[in-house]
Amino acid sequence: MTESTPPHPVLEEYYSTAANRQSFVGELFDGAASYYNRIGQMLDLGSGPWYRRQALQRAGLRPGMWLLDVATGTGLVAHGGAAILGDSGRVIGVDPSRGMLREARKTLAGPLVQGRAEALPFCSDSFDMLSMGFALRHVADLEVAFHEYRRVLKAGGRLLLLEVSRPPSRVSRWLMQAHFQHVLPLMTRISTRSEPAQLLMKYYWDTIDRCVPPETILDALRRNGFVEVERRVFFGFLSEYVAAKPPR
């Protein structure tokens, strides 16, 4: 695989080179992990439990399937999957952050594994669906991650990527930027007193604002062998990227 597609350029205000991205993101999420669910309640942006379950169902998750939730964090999408499947043992969560996995283990009964999207520690052709909730911006290379996603999915398996996209409207962008860069950090500082949690909110916006266009993500999925590739948009900024691994 020769082509490389980072989800956004190097953000020098946070880390100096692409090689430093992984360690910065890991330390940031480890530091904010114990406050993440509290932050999520303030962040939300339509991604509450009802929305996550609906998105999984729209993508085709049904009882009897096996779901891999990549970058599971504290397990918010995994909880939605377990509710649909009726069996938490059929939802496997994987995340690079030990801190986030520690928080996830407090509420998730299913298997949790430490690992990265670009090197998934699972056999090929293992899962009926793979989900990733609002974390695509944190991988190092879309090409490598999508190649791995296709590898671990069964033939005909489904893919669901939830993301917050940069709003097309200038007014909407200004409102969202103000929310992420000023309102949320202030609320986070008052409620958590955590510097990593405050920094996470600012970092979120910069990754959203400088993320590659949706068309680049769709093209990368197609290049890596996915079919039925499409993007569904809600409220102008919530993106659901759905695709399938070809049947045999």
Image (tube, rainbow, N blue to C red):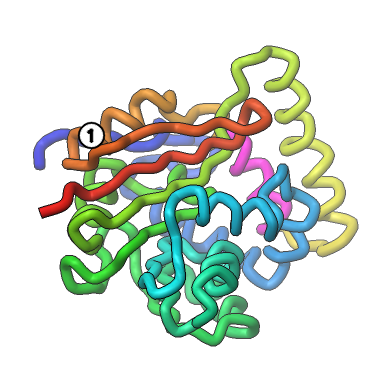
Membership of 238 in magenta stretch: no
> Which residue in the structure is indicated by mark 1?
222
Q: Which residues are magenta?
A: 196-206
- As drawn, 118 above or below 236: below
Which sits in the foreground, 233 or 25?
Answer: 233
- Where is the N terminus found, in terms of image quarters? top left
Query: Which quadrant of the figure has residue 112?
Result: bottom left
> Residue 69 appears at what percent x and percent y?
43, 64
Q: Is residue 46 left or right of residue 144?
A: right
Q: Residue at x 64, y 82 (%)?
A: 107
Percent coordinates x, y for residue 228 in the rendering: 29, 37
Residue at 78% x, 46% y is 185
Residue type indicated by callout 1? Arg
Q: Is residue 85 rendered to the left or right of residue 216?
A: right
Q: Is residue 162 above or below residue 68?
A: above
**Quadrant including the C terminus:** bottom left
- Can I make out residue 96 in this image? no
User: Which residue is depicted at the point 23% across and 34% down?
Assistant: 222
